[in-house]
Image (cartoon, rainbow, N blue to C red):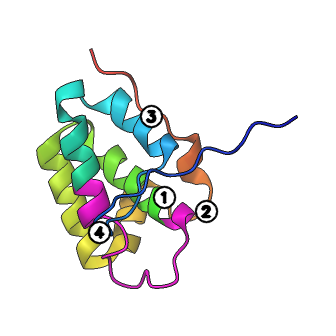
Amino acid sequence: MTSPKTSPVASPDGASPISPETEKRIALLFPPDEHARVRKILSEHCGRNLPLTTNASETTFERIQFAALKLSEGDLNKLDRAVALAKRDWRDLLMAAGFAHQIEAHKAWWPERRG
């Protein structure tokens, strides 16, 4: 018997869901008291609202969100800058994070645990 695949946590207000893998990376990068804020930034400003994502898959949003997290280095100000870059052109964000040339490159990235 196989275990069911964990699905992304959907937001009731129509924001983009945060995948379980994104949650893991948030937990590694940011202190617990910032997790809700990081989730809100990613779901409301770094997902379905981005340009050229009308037909994008959940994997595409996860890839973009991983890129923003990677560039943040666990700092909310850097996260805001990464999300601003995604809003201008999320493909530039993928380039900056090193996730542009291989579609699955983001899955191999794991941040170091804080502290």
> Which label number is shown at residue 63?
1
The dominant secondary structure in magenta is loop
Q: Earlier in the sequence, mark 3 or mark 4?
A: 3
Q: Is mark 1 on a helix, strand or loop?
A: helix
Element on which disc 2 rests: loop
In the picture, the quarter occupied by the C terminus is top left
Residue 103, labelled with which disc? 2
In magenta stretch: residue 46: yes
Question: Closer to us: mark 2 or mark 1?
Answer: 1
Classed neighbour count for the residue bearing mark 1: other residues with Cα under 10 Å, few (<14), some (14–19), many (≥20): many
x and y percent of residue 57 in the render? Answer: 55, 71
* Circle 1/circle 4 CB separation < 8 Å: no
Q: Mark 4 points at which residue?
A: 86
Q: Residue at x 21, y 50 (%)?
A: 79
The reply to whether callout 2 and callout 1 are in contact (CB within 8 Å) is yes
The residue positioned 48% from the left and 34% from the top of the image is 110
- Highlighted magenta segment, given as a residue range: 41-60
